[in-house]
Amino acid sequence: MSETPEPLLSVEGLEKHFPITKGLIKRQVGAVKAVDGLTFDVRKGETLGLVGESGCGKTTTGRLITRLLEPTGGTVRFEGHDITHMSQGALRPLRRDMQMIFQDPYSSLNPRHTVGAIVGAPFRIQGVKTEQGTKKAVQEILELVGLNPEHYNRYPHEFSGGQRQRIGIARTLALKPKLIIADEPVSALDVSIQAQVVNLLEDLQNELDLTYVVIAHDLSVVRHISDRVAVMYLGKIVEIADRKGLYERPMHPYTTALLSAVPIPDVKARGGRDRIRLQGDVPSPLNPPPACRFHTRCWKAQEVCKTVEPPLVALAPGHQVACHFPENAPAPADAAPEAAVPAAPGAATE
Amino acid sequence: MSFLELEDLRIHFPTDDGLVKSVDGLSFSLERGKTLGIVGESGSGKSVTSLGILGLHKGGRARISGEIRLDGDELVSAGPEHVRALRGKKMAMIFQDPLSAMHPYYTVGAQIIEAYRIHNPVSKAVARKHAIDMLGRVGIPQPDRRVDSYPHEFSGGMRQRAMIAMALSCDPELLIADEPTTALDVTVQAQILDLMRDLQQEFNSALIIITHDLGVVAELSDDILVMYGGKCIEYGTAEDIFERPEHPYTWGLLGSMPRLDREPTERLMPIKGTPPSLINVPSGCAFHPRCAFEGRTGGKAKTAVPELLETEGGHLVRCHMAGEERRAIWENEIKPNLESV
């Protein structure tokens, strides 16, 4: 081990290409590069936020880490074990330590199972015996997530959306995992309920020393709960930094644009903000633009962006960016400073 | 007289489980060229209100009472044919999910042409030209080609633009947008919000925007109406609602939202409990089981429904607490927590 402790989760060059087949013999004619070379670490006890627009591969990433999908390239290491191509049988003991919270509290709970059966399932599957018996253990967890333990025998339809999400969280926590992947844990919930669940996730993290990877599209929620944030665009990480660095000094134009697109509930600021309007939509991952994938929508794009893919490099401590012309870059720029052309005035800001 | 006036609108649905009072005594007015934001959580009655204005509950099981006056024309008692003639022409709607609001078997152009020709006696060729023109106006590239595309060939943002083009094709004076950007990504959402703002100025229409996202409302609205349990609980200008809100529910909504424009707060301040079922609306003030200040009403909150009263300059609040008390709570207890340093 080096000077820093080994990360809980370490992802290197992770790839998932979904094949597109055609014809009778299912000849592969192409691939959707949903995730195309991700490298990041998650340290114990921290929360990594994964943000991006729809189709950027954030959900696929979550499913690759938990091995609900098999990666087509790269490695995933969990506590030093290479789990990239581990068989489902071999993975099973590890699943105790690695759990997932799903987005939709309606479809992720079996409507024919009682809450007790749902939250107790991990004990049954993993063959875990508790001193007080499973029922007692389940009731304790229900209490921990703010549900009434007497509701043990109720069915999911008897609960509201927020309560169902708590049931999902209770199931996730049943075996006291080390890592929790939360895929859009609050986006299906009402505003007031979102805040309850966000607070709950934070409390549980402090109480149980959990590590989170939170996948979300809502930049405000991600800023609220994350220690570090990775921004994804078309299957790649374009920027990864600690929260303060990313939100206060975003370096990638895409991050800047994302942040300026979020509507701010402040009437005084209305019209006063410099807003960057990105043109068009996210291109299809079926046929992503070459080199820098953002160049088709970027106002800083130059010829080089269309031909050379920018590597993800650290421009400040703990702040990695994949861009030829980063913004807010620290003054002693090691990469050709004369190449950094300022944004064309009036091109996109107003 | 205002352009649009609602007076004591009630939309109730009888069901096997009881009477669902989706909208229960709603009154507001709106002028041309102005934007009203209606905010509320799921089940607060905001969408039912919008469908009610368009007369889309007519002929169903809904029991509608009260008055809706559009340009002096009373719509609740009007016959379905009369409302139908107005719908699309005088008032139009942008729905949340353009994929399910558009017919998958017809091209986008055909759907706009149909809507236009129902209200305007023109030839197909003229209507088609108009459709292409509208698609171009909402920012769809190559509108002369895209007019023959099917909805599934459009991306989410493009589809929403096409919906807006369809809604605007007859130059409506009232436009209702029900969660117009909820299904969209933030960068696309920003495009659509800009587009709606520009088009509203161009057409000088009255716009009602219905959403749960306070950020979207703050960007667009002149006035804001906060709904809870089928009733308006606070109404005022955007400044009133964001700068000096007086209803505990509005405080709760503001406290529930993490905000990008401020230092991150340590903890969010959610509202406890869950939104009420509209079959069993709590007695008295519908918000009292979730209200942190219920104890300060001397038990009135449980028994009496508070009136929607003006506190100052058109700012209406439905709360038992006295105005000074509410303002003191906002200044001393709520606001400092929202702006933690």
Image (tube, rainbow, N blue to C red):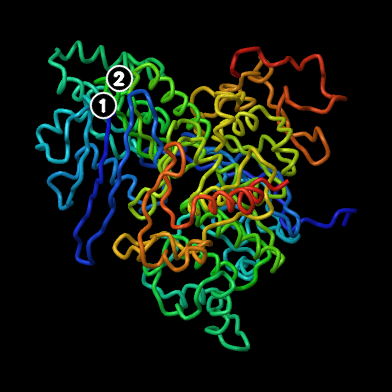
Residue B27, x across and y down, in percent: 30, 42
Which is nearer the eye, A204 or A283? A204
Residue at x 9% of width, y 33% of height:
B81
Which subunit holds the residue at mark 2?
B
Quarter occupied by the N terminus of chain B = top left
Q: How many marks?
A: 2
Q: In the image, is residue A24 above or below residue A286?
A: below
Chain letter of the residue beneath label 1 in the structure image: B
Residue A252 higher or lower than A227, as above or below: above
- Observer able to see residue A107: no
Q: Secondary structure at mark 1?
A: loop
Is disc 1 in the same subunit as disc 2? Answer: yes
Tell me the residue that label 2 is attached to: B147
**Helix, strand or loop at mark 2:** loop
Of B153 and A185, the residue lying toward us: A185
Picture coordinates of residue A190, whole percent (x, y): 46, 53
Image height check: is B13 above or below B194?
below
Crowding near pointer 2: few (<14 within 10 Å), some, many (20+)? many
- The amino acid on which the numbered mark 2 sits, given as a three-letter code, is Val
User: Mark 1 = which residue?
Assistant: B107
Name the quadrant containing residue B151: top left
Residues at marks 1 and 2, CA–CA distance in whole angstroms: 7 Å
Residue at 66% across / 27% down in the picture? A253
* Visible residue check, residue B139: yes
- Is the residue under label 2 in contact with that under label 1 (CB below 8 Å)? yes
- Does B242 sit above or below residue A102? above
Pointer 1 local density, CA inside 10 Å: few below 14, some 14–19, many at least 20: some
Residue type highlighted by circle 1:
Thr
- Looking at the image, residue A267 sits to the left or right of residue B11; the answer is right
Q: Earlier in the sequence, mark 1 or mark 2?
A: 1
The residue sitting at 43% across, 24% down in the picture is: B197
